[in-house]
Amino acid sequence: MNQDSASEASGEISGFGIWKGFKSLAVQTMSYYTRGCLLSSRPLLLLLATVTAVALSGCTRKSTAQISPVDLSLRLKTPFRFAAYGDTRFHDPNDTEAANPPVRRALVQAIADVNPAFICFTGDIVYNGYDAEDWKVWDAETSVWREKKIPIYPALGNHDLHGNEQIALGNYFQRFPDLKGSRFYSVRIANVLMLVLDSSLDEIAGPQGQWIAGKLDHVSADVDFVFIMDHHPPYTSSSDEKKLGGGHSVRPREQALAQMLEDRQVHARYRIVFFSGHVHNYERHEHGGITYFVSGGGAAHAYPIERAPSDPFQSKTVNYHYLLVQVDQHQLTVTMNRIDLSSGKAVWTQPDVVKITSPAAMAVSHLTQGR
């Protein structure tokens, strides 16, 4: 059964089907009534009004369920580099509570200046997904990317779905027509397979969970790295207690997703790398052979994190930033590019740089060293 059929089986009944049921019920009811059944006019009218309301709502309602996910591709050769970050909250530039507009604009320009092959968003592109004005700010402030024809691969964040979900998704897909309505999708790029997820949907069960498992079951032999892009992080040292002004605890379903990925990584010939956002800072975690990046420093209201002593990256400050990822054969380098505008002038630093090697390259290295 395809996903559209599955949606119908799970309750997504078409308006036409409801109308047929209404027609049949109405005919039967009127038949009983005219034959003298003990139905008063009041109950009959109430019944017909209720069924009519259901029928009309079914005819006009549009489903926001995932259609068949698209499989995109970008023709590149190694080496190449791309930018990744999230939680930009494009919004009214006069509102400095929701985000830091000067930082947001500086990050957009800095990314444009390095000419990445593409840009990945870890969610919360805008402040309110339903708000057409927020999306107009996105249009205006990121125009330089479109002028340079830089492809953008976004993951949906919770803010992107704020308000009426149908309107929010309409605004979102209007900006990203290549997704063809797919809330989760894949991109094949040189030696990379990228799986972009929707963390508002179950990542383990249901259509998205089945899709992820199927993709990981059939990774091509020439893939060195599998990138997972998801809004909610499987690991973070922040918490819902918001001791330092903000933060989010890890949710059980992202923990389950991480466990599934780590179980697979044990025997995989490719290296899994996880990019997320939601937490408005920068974090890096290492678990089960997988490197997890939290890149939510795109300009949304930022806060420090009470980091665990074992965290690979330590910082007591706010970290507005973007990640620049250099991809080579069997190896990639991820550099955190941090911006500080507190002095009124942009100060750029690179407080975290990490190299990640594919299992195949590590195996060759061990054989060479053993000779």
Image: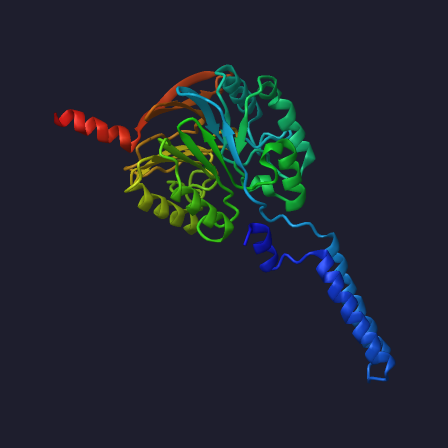
Q: Quadrant of the C terminus?
A: top left
Q: Is residue 300 left or right of residue 147?
A: left
* Residue under the point 35% across and 25% down: 332
Q: Is residue 182 above or below residue 8?
A: above
Number of callouts: 0
Q: Is residue 289 above or below residue 13?
A: above
Q: Is residue 249 visible?
A: no
Q: Is residue 280 left or right of residue 36?
A: left
Residue 211 in the image: state x and y as whole percent: 47, 46
Q: Quadrant of residue 329?
A: top left
Residue 366 in the image: state x and y as whole percent: 18, 29
Q: Quadrant of residue 189?
A: top left
Q: Is residue 90 left or right of residue 38?
A: left
* Residue under the point 53% across and 33% down: 154
Residue 194 in the image: state x and y as whole percent: 45, 34
* Residue under the point 59% across and 29% down: 96
Q: Is residue 150 left or right of residue 356?
A: right
Q: Is residue 220 visible?
A: yes
In the depicted view, which residue is nearer to us: 78 or 171?
A: 78
In the depicted view, which residue is nearer to us: 51 or 180?
A: 180
In the depicted view, which residue is nearer to us: 14 or 239?
A: 14
Residue 347 in the image: state x and y as whole percent: 45, 16
Q: Quadrant of the N terminus?
A: bottom right
* Residue under the point 40% across and 47% down: 257
Q: Is residue 286 above or below residue 67?
A: above
Q: Residue furthest left?
A: 371
Asked which colour scheme the image uses, the reply is rainbow
